[in-house]
Amino acid sequence: MRKAAGFGAALCALLLLPAVARAHYGIADGGLISGLMHPVFGLDHLLAMICVGVVSVQLGGHNIWRIPVAFVAAMIAGGVAGILRPRLGPLFPVDLGIAASVLVLGLAIAVAHRAMSPWPITAMVLFFGACHGYAHGLEIPAAVSPALYTLGFVISTATLHIFGVIIGEIATMQRWLWTGLRFSGGVVAFIGATFLLQMVQRMA
């Protein structure tokens, strides 16, 4: 159990390190580098996208590629909606959806297993992917190179999913690693709950 707790603590520390400097990476150049860095230096984006990869391994089978692909596809659709926002008018407050994604996906890691139906988690991944994409889409019109910025955050998102898959696969090697992974999911869910509470307080 100590090994599992230690693994969970180490994993959470690893996930938090890239976001210590700042919560979100700016779009100063508005190009490929900004698109690549935005998901990495936004802690909410970072955690959610890694969680997608991890939970896809926990569900197993075709879900290992199906769930990350679903997230990326929904994110692209959400990005288009963000770009078209002036025409569409006010939409769902996606900041709440992004904060909720960290909470829900963290809980998913804590409970997901191969025997359960993948569709509820897939549905949540689609919704949260659209929320993350919409947030990116709102920034794209201000970018110097919208196409490169879009390409950057898609590549970065896919890379984070792959990183999550690697974490999940490593955790399958030892029972204590698997237990530690579930513990880490609980910690991520707690961080997500904190994000969500802060967001609600700002909107109040």
Image (tube, rainbow, N blue to C red):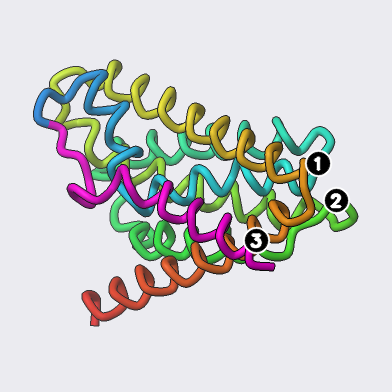
Amino acid at circle 1: Gly
Residue at disc 1, secondary structure:
loop
Q: Which residue is disc 3 drawn over?
A: 4
Q: Position of residue 173 (x, y in %)?
A: 77, 41
Q: The N terminus appears in which quarter of the rendering?
A: bottom right
Residue at disc 3, secondary structure:
helix
Asked if residue 112 is positioned above or below residue 162 in the image, the reply reads below
Question: Which disc number belongs to residue 114?
Answer: 2
Amino acid at circle 3: Ala
Q: Position of residue 188 (x, y in %)?
A: 49, 62
Within 10 Å of disc 3 (Cα), the crowding (few <14, some 14-19, many 20+) is: many
Within 10 Å of disc 2 (Cα), the crowding (few <14, some 14-19, many 20+) is: some
Q: Position of residue 146 (x, y in %)?
A: 24, 22
Asked if residue 1 is positioned above or below residue 41 in the image, the reply reads below
Verify whether residue 16 appears in magenta: yes
Is the C-beta separation of discs 1 and 3 under 8 Å? no
User: What secondary structure characterizes most of the magenta part?
Assistant: helix
Q: Which residues are magenta?
A: 1-27
Indicate which disc, 2 or 3, sits on the residue closer to the N terminus: 3
- Residue shown at 71%/60% (left/top)? 179
- Residue shown at 79%/54% (left/top)? 175
Q: Which residue is disc 1 drawn over?
A: 60
Whether residue 109 is visible here, answered yes or no, is: no
Amino acid at circle 2: Arg
Indicate which disc, 1 or 3, sits on the residue closer to the N terminus: 3
Asked if residue 29 is positioned above or below residue 132 in the image, the reply reads above
Verify whether residue 102 appears in magenta: no
Residue at disc 2, secondary structure:
loop
Pick the front one: 187 or 31: 187
